[in-house]
Amino acid sequence: MKNRLLILIPIISMFISCSDDITDLNKNTKDATVVPAEFLFTNAEKAMMDQVTSTSVNFNIFRLFSQQWTEVQYPQESQYDLTGRKIPDAHWNVYYRDVLRDFKESKNLLLDKKAHFVGSPAEAKALDNKLAIIDILSSYTYGLLVDTFGDIPYTESLDIIKYPQPKYDDAKTIYMDLIAKLTAASHALDKNNGSFDSADLVYHGNTAKWAKFANSLRLRMAINMADVDASYASAQALAAIADGIIASSADSAYLVYTPLQPNTNPLYVDLVASGRNDFLPADTFVNKMNDLSDPRRAEYFTEYPEGSGTYKGGVYGVLNTYANFSHLTPTIKEPEYPGVLFTYSEVEFLLAEASARGMAVAGTPASHYTAAITASMTDWGVAPADIATYLARPDVAYATATGTWQQKIGTQSWIALYNRGFEAWTSYRRLDFPVLNVPPVTYEDADGPIKVVPRRYSYPGAEETLNSTNLKAAVSKIGSNGTSKRIFWDKF
């Protein structure tokens, strides 16, 4: 009996000393209930870069659409099979769910902080800079979705409570609104103050560089619209240039990955860690570079046969044997190889195009064309003497190269946009050069057998179930959900 009392005394004492309120026992002290705005921003920024960089056939097949690459034993995606792996669904979900939603949550937290702000003037300016950068990257993401699908949910997107079935907004209207938002965000940035600092994986909080990125994006979107509304496009392009665009490779937008997974370049995961050999440089691409004796071949591909000084691409859109062709350069397979959003070379090609279209930009089509090729080759480590030799070729020099300005700029831009499949595909759709080949065998879409290089992704299959009425209205507007339908700016 004495022993039992000795045991009960401390137990009774514990209950006497405790409060009747036991709600604290339900708190999970190990998992965060509120995520800092900076963490959400970083997560969204990385997800955005991963998606545009990846070459997984489940997520990103734009290197195949632009015919820079082809496949080996499984050529379905080179033959335009979008539905077998639900590729449009994955692309859509990453950008809406993993990128835009996190940017929105980050912005909401920052706005709440601003509403209850306590801090120094410099901290207040840094807070405003963070909001402007989120607007810039959200605009980039929405623009990419428009360039992929056409009309998309925009004004009613990202609010599942209020708009569980968001309407699809007009693509041109979205584009013009995005250009306005980019303009406002660029002007709002205080270049003398910081922003996200180390939480920003691209520019590390450098607001001056983010302003140049925003203005360069305005330039790209304006050029995309040139065949739709020439006067508007010219005005917006010139305004963007006046505000300050990317002016050297030091301003280019890169994200440098880390040596260890899960933060390596997605190409390393897809091409090395997977242990698979699923991709080859495409003959469409390699043959053109062979015709021009392009010195970037040594940076883009391995030689075939090894040590021969020659290069051979896999046949686009058919079965290939991996051992019988050149391979992708080891450079892009490094785990730390940077992802790319925008380069100085691309800006110079856009300026060449603007000048060729008659926009009142400084310089000539030839001067910007030459600067663009030079910047691309310099970025890839080509020696200055080899650059000069290439530019002097009659089939490369702007004055003597074959064809219209669209053919000259389109072909060289396509080569310079190597490993940037989405923008290479966009350049091809806008300029209709180079001439790309449709594989001998293709899959079907809503319009039947696919007979042209896809001009858009079909809308995600999940939308047929989750947002059927609004999807049908969007499909009815463009005529079908086929891949041959053109994005609003793709007029020819």
Image (cartoon, rainbow, N blue to C red):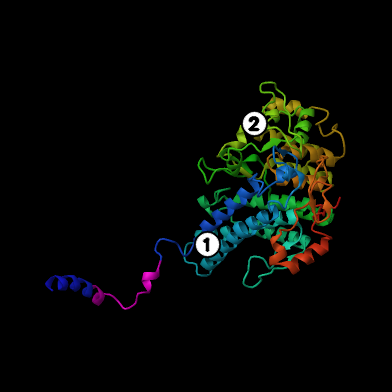
Q: Quadrant of residue 26?
A: bottom left
Q: How far apart are marks 1 and 2 (CA)?
A: 42 Å
Horizontal side, residue 3 vs residue 337: left or right: left
Q: How crowded is mark 2: few (under 14 residues within 10 Å), some or many (20 or more)?
A: few
Residue farthest toward the left in the current orientation of the protein? 2
- Which label sits on residue 381? 2
Does residue 139 sit above or below 435 in this rendering?
below
- Which label sits on residue 264? none
Badge 2 marks a residue whose secondary structure is: loop
Q: Position of residue 36 (x, y in %)?
A: 49, 60
Residue farthest toward the front in the current orientation of the protein? 1
Does residue 344 sit above or below 469 in this rendering?
above
Pointer 1 residue: 124
Identify the amino acid type marked 1: Ala
Point 67% across, 65% down: residue = 157
Which quarter of the image is occupied by the N terminus? bottom left
Residue 201 shown in magenta? no
Horizontal side, residue 12 vs residue 333: left or right: left
Report the span colored magenta: 14-27
Does residue 98 sit above or below 20 in this rendering?
above
Q: Where is residue 5 in the image (x, y as percent from the top left)?
A: 15, 73
Q: How crowded is mark 1: few (under 14 residues within 10 Å), some or many (20 or more)?
A: some
Point 64% across, 36% down: residue = 277
